[in-house]
Image: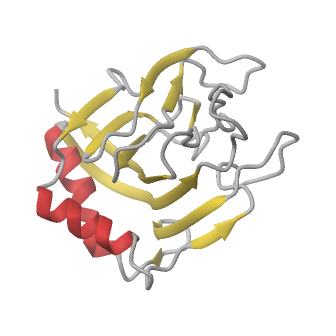
Amino acid sequence: MITNDIIKQTGIVDDEVLKDLWDTVTDVKFDWHYMPDITWENGRKPTTPTPGFAHLLFHRDTGEASPYLEKFKPVLDRMCWKADIELEEVIRLRLGFLMNTRYNFPSQAYAHNEPHVDFPGEDHYTACFYLNDTDGETIIFHQREKAERYQVAERSMPIKNSAIIFDGGRYHASTCPKIRDTRIVLTMNFKGKRSA
């Protein structure tokens, strides 16, 4: 178990770098892949699915690497440096694109997506880096086991060029935007040691 496991950061990369990353993911040539339920990759769930788009930059288990990996890897390096985490192993880097498809009316309450752990049984960090200012919080729960009800430990509003890092053993969930039309997040799963 990782201690002192919720870290919030701002100003991860320079403005020019952030603009380049944003221009990359919003370019018509960028390779987004449609998923009928972007929040539940490893099985079926009985609730309403959340359609969205993903781009896998890297996955340790397959060795698969996107041609865009080198453009996004400095985000992880810089984030770890700022948090005094010595990066030991990259498990996965994945871009996720959620849209405001969940709400029929602005008055509808926000509803988070499926609580999950990205890599169950492995001691690792999970981090979310926000590429744009939007609504749709990332919610981190106290629970480290599947539960009927989850208790919120932390909420993180997507603010561009900010990140939240936490123990990957915690259940967490994304929330679709309601006010803005897009929510683009780089999710990073990795192993490391924190010196502070």
Q: What scheme was used to colour the molecule?
A: secondary structure
Residues 102 and 17: in front is 102
Query: Is 34 above or below relative to 85?
Result: below
Along the viewing direction, whichever of 62 and 96 lies nearer the viewer: 96
- Determine the residue positioned at 66% across, 38% down: 113
Q: How many marks?
A: 0
Q: Position of residue 186 (x, y in %)?
A: 40, 55
Residue at the far right: name it. 46
Q: Image height check: is 55 above or below 68?
A: above
Screen quadrant of the C terminus? top left
Residue 103 position (above or below residue 17):
above
The percent coordinates of residue 122 (x first, y second) are 53, 42
User: Quarter holding the N terminus?
Assistant: top left
Q: Is residue 148 left or right of residue 7?
A: right
Q: Residue at x 84, y 50 (%)?
A: 44
Q: Residue at x 30, y 71 (%)?
A: 23
Residue 169 at x, y percent in the picture: 53, 33
Relative to 164, 77 lies left or right: left
Residue 144 left/right relative to 158? right
What residue do we see at 77% from left, 49% from top?
49
Residue 65 percent coordinates (x, y): 44, 77
